[in-house]
Amino acid sequence: MEENKELTRHDQLKYRLKRRISPELFEAMPIELQDYLMELDPADIKEAYLNTLLKLPWLADRSIPDVDLPYAKKMLDKTHYAMFDIKEKILRYMACQKHLGKNYGAVLLLVGPPGVGKTSIASSIAKAMGRPFIKISLAGISDSLFLRGTQTIFKDARVGRIVDALIRGKSFCPLILLDEIDKMGDSKEHGDPESVLLDVLDSDRSKFVDNFLGFSMDLSNVIFIATANRLEPLSPVLKDRLDIIQLPPYKPVDKKRIVEKHMWPRLTVEYKLDCLDYLVDPLQETLAHPEALRLEEDAVDEMIARCPEEGVRNLERLCRQLCESVIGTYYATGEIISSIDKPTMDRLLAPIYYK
């Protein structure tokens, strides 16, 4: 009986909509949207609007993914050294969401200097929670239409970045990173994007309306995480909606551990220097030099002294430069460098091809 009722609602669609929207897709849409489509005149619907509507993941599973806390802890420990207080708070956040079966608490705001791992820890949270990860950069954005979309009456109208994130993530349960919210501007003509954020980050997210679509979207299963370098540019109202987590700068001992245990092993694999046979024979047909490229302690200390910033971004750039120089040296002179100490590092950072 229920099935006949749903099919009857689908039959009430005008011909063009009924032809483009299958009964299964129509049934997966919210009742409010079904009513909205049944009242629409197909002559008033632009093709771009209909294509966007069909791209939304209506048939995707809308249940909140279950969180495996031991796996989440292992993932955070693997991708981020130290940060014990931050990881403890994040795991408690995940545990409460697992227990309640819904999104829990305020939106997390990760605050810290550049290069301390704000974006990467948000990506690790998404992976640990089994959610698609979508990043929206807000640096320099001064137009609320960027987030809320433009109405279809305008030329080149399109959805805002919030709805676009649902389309790209192919899910109504993604983790959306609002990156660099402290660098937003405002516009007198098109409104302040911060006002849209206040609407999106409200505890009741089931009534968000994108200007392009024209109907309310349920964002209650979406997790939002924000990042900022400083708190001062944020308004008190916006800060009140956020659960602020301060990421401290890395100490030299932390940087040393990160380079030795995380960064250097990852980059040697990326550059195929975990086994120097890749240099001797890229086809791996001979096995004359099985050792991996080693980084000695005095070289690590020198790298940290050359990169005094609070994060580790420049440290990674320096490590990449060393890997590139080892490869460049081999193809320029035939020399295979199996370990890098301070004198070797000074030589590798000097010109290779143009002396």
Image (tube, rainbow, N blue to C red):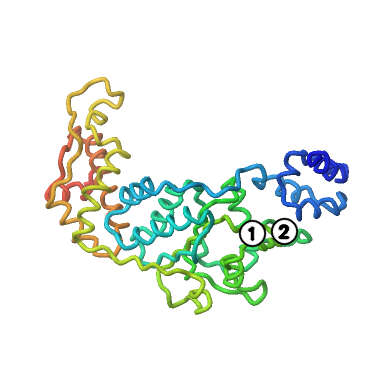
Q: Position of residue 163 (x, y in %)?
A: 63, 55
Name the foreground residue: 146 vs 253: 253
Q: Amino acid at mark 2?
A: Phe
**Mark 2 sits on what residue?**
212
Q: Position of residue 337 (x, y in %)?
A: 17, 38
Instruction: Residue 203: name its quadrant.
Output: bottom right
User: Tag count in the figure?
Assistant: 2
The disc at residue 259 is none
At x 65% / y 57%, what residue is drawn? Answer: 218
Identity of the residue furthest to the top in this view: 285
> Does 300 sit left or right of 142 as displayed?
left
Name the foreground residue: 172 vs 179: 172
Instruction: Residue 2: name its quadrant.
Output: top right
User: Tag 1, which secondary structure?
Assistant: loop
**Mark 1 sits on what residue?**
160
For residue 182, above or below residue 215 = below
CA gap, disc 1 and disc 2: 8 Å
At x 58% / y 48%, what residue is drawn? Answer: 63
